[in-house]
Image (spheres, grey):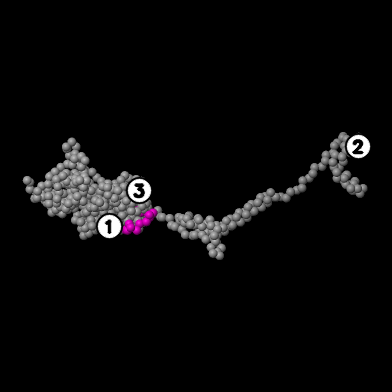
Amino acid sequence: MYEENNTTNNQDTGSTPNTNYGPSSYSNYNFNQGYQNPNGTPFPNTTPVPPKKEKKPGKVGGFFKKLILVAVLGVFFGACAGATFYGVYNYFGLGNKASQIAEGTTINKTDTADLNKDAKAEEGTKPAVSTEVSKVIESDISEVVESVMPSMVSVTNKAIVNYNYWGRVFSEEQEGRGSGIIVGKNDTELLIVTNYHVINGAETIEITFNDDSVYQANVKGTNKNMDLAVVAVKLADMDESTLNEIKIASLGDSDSLKLGEPVIAIGNALGYGQSVTNGIVSALNREIEMEDGSTGTFIQTNAAINPGNSGGALLNYNGEVIGINSNKIGGETIEGMGYAIPISSAKPIIAELMLKDTKTKVDSEDDIGYIGIQPANVMDGMPAGVYVAKVYEGTPAEEAGIRTGDIIVGIDNEEVGSYADLQKALTYLPGGTHTEIDIKRYGANGFEDVTVDITLGSRADIQTD
């Protein structure tokens, strides 16, 4: 080739090879002259083509080796970063806290604050970090509920309501539903506590137990001011299977309750049967004004207490009754605000009511007690009750100090809103019964409350003027 021949000639002459192949080096060479062939005929003019620069052979697989190198370096630096993070994470105790959160615990507020401090322990090598944790409240209350259900009952109040329509009196049976708690037993009766307003005015009372058996009950004692009542079911009327299913509730101590303590409410909500709700103690010793103007002190909770829950149990997580629910307290139902009678306040009253004689209807009309008054309807502007139009001489009413113009509003702790209510109450009070009558008496300051003691006579002894 041209370059090779030129180089060889230079070497033969001992001169330095001319490596300058710029335009000036080719200007002295006439590429247009022809070559002669042996017979003297010139070859066609040709232009020499500069030789192509050969590429140096590359190493096989170089690209893939670089790719592998990058991957290896990435893994190496990733491992280093992970090890460093892990060491710092455990050095500050954060790993333990993460596992605690995953297992359902919460970090104390002081933990977070301590992590932001630079202070070191005395001559220590680590920052002072609190590791105290508080347990999260378990939401599964099924075992507690299962253990207390045999002590819970539903209460049905069947009452006869009288309506006066244009001088004609109509009667209608109505049902009210509530809840109750088995609190005791004597030789002949099973004793159940409920709210007074649940059984007030009842013609008959039915108790539904945990096994769905239903038995009739009678009132044993009531306390209107505390909204408490004790009713009794005769043991002789109950099946052995039911007696084996039920148990007496454990009464706790409401004085030891704390704000935020978890509680469970059980009752016959809306009359559909026993239901369970839970919440916390929202307030203690909450003062609530009652319908009659008096003030009571109650436990406030956010556990749902709906109509029908009245008389049911408010329990702690040990299954102990710490309150008796009342839907009547606080007026209209407000979501998240329920009230219960503290059991520590109710215990002595319940014990007193359990010792009273059970009220049963008098067998003979001649034995029904009588007072000795001429009743009349109250007029507008007067308190609801029975107006005393006349007091007969020589009667229990006269001896008790009842006066003409008085309004009877209650007897034997039973509300009296009409003469029909008074008659019904007397059917449970035979002649000779010593009891109390509540009266509204008009005075200088308007109607005043008066209570008189009376020993009832019997209708057989009634003498007309």
Disc 2, disc 3: CB below 8 Å? no
Disc 2, disc 1: CB below 8 Å? no
Distance, label 2 to label 1, CA atoms, is 141 Å
Q: Residue furthest front?
A: 444
> What secondary structure is marked by label 3?
loop
Residue 121 in view in this figure: yes
Q: Residues within 10 Å of mark 2 (few under 14, many from 20)?
A: few
Residue at the spot 51% in from the left edge and 57% down from the top edge: 114
In the image, residue 163 sits, relative to residue 314, either above or below, namely above
Give, as a three-letter code, the residue at label 3: Met
> What secondary structure is marked by label 1?
helix
In the picture of the structure, the residue carrying the numbered disc 2 is 36
Q: Residues within 10 Å of mark 1 (few under 14, many from 20)?
A: some
Instruction: Residue 168 in the image: state x and y as whole percent.
Output: 17, 37
Q: Nearer the viewer, mark 2 or mark 3?
A: 3
**Was residue 255 drawn as part of the magenta stretch in this picture?**
yes
Give, as a three-letter code, the residue at label 2: Gln
Q: Residue furthest bottom?
A: 123
Q: Which residues are magenta?
A: 252-265
Q: Earlier in the sequence, mark 2 or mark 3?
A: 2
Instruction: Residue 107 in the image: state x and y as whole percent.
Output: 47, 56
**Was residue 151 drawn as part of the magenta stretch in this picture?**
no
Residue at the spot 26% in from the left edge and 58% down from the top edge: 348
Give, as a three-letter code, the residue at label 1: Lys
Instruction: Residue 263 in the image: state x and y as whole percent.
Output: 36, 54
Q: Earlier in the sequence, mark 3 or mark 1?
A: 3
Front residue (pair 252, 438)? 438
In the picture of the structure, the residue carrying the numbered disc 1 is 347
In the picture of the structure, the residue carrying the numbered disc 3 is 337
In the image, residue 110 sits, relative to residue 28, either above or below, namely below
